[in-house]
Amino acid sequence: VKGVASKVVFAAPKTPLSAPTQIITSEHFKDILVVDPANKRIVEYSKDGAVVHEYTSEQLTDLHSVALDESSKIVYCLAGQRILKFAL
């Protein structure tokens, strides 16, 4: 683990998170992605805690795992037996 721990208060998205399952970030990616399968979405936060964007889709049902290709800013989602991708 690198860096210094700091307290960040995250803003509430339009609909509150419902049992989020995964957080994705890195030192090279400027934001934080939070996977919220119950609401069929991925919420993008700034590292300051502000909501940047909410990605929602009816295709995000049965969302199991999410991966980020930082260099191309492409998100890959395992939803059921499908692999979906979208650009940030």
Image (spheres, helix red, strand yellow):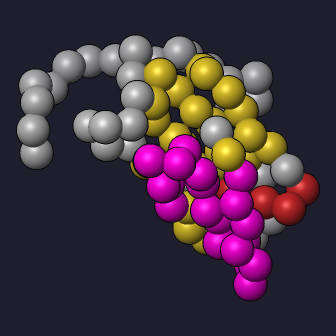
- Above or below — where is 23 with respect to 27? below
Q: Quadrant of residue 1?
A: top left
Magenta span: 67-86
- How many numbered callouts? 0
37 to the left or right of 72:
right
Q: Give the residue displayed 78% in from the left and 60% down from the top.
A: 60
At x 51%, y 61%, the residue is 67
> Which residue occupies 20% across, 19% down?
6
Q: Nearer the viewer, residue 21 or 42?
A: 42
Image quadrant occupied by the C terminus? top right
Q: Residue furthest front?
A: 72
Residue nearest the observer in this picture, 71 or 66 = 71
Image location (x, y in percent) of residue 13: 67, 24
Image coordinates of residue 44 in percent, x first then y, are: 58, 33
- Against 19, residue 59 (above or below) is below
The answer to which of 56 and 69 lies nearer the viewer is: 69
35 w.r.t. 54: above or below? below
Residue 20 appearing in the image: no
x, y (%) of residue 21? 52, 56
For the view shown, which residue lies furthest in the bottom direction?
Answer: 81
- The reply, left or right, for residue 1 in relation to residue 12 is left
Any magenta on residue 26?
Answer: no
| Residue 18 occupies quadrant | top right
Is residue 77 located in the magenta-colored stretch of the structure? yes
Q: Is residue 80 visible?
A: yes
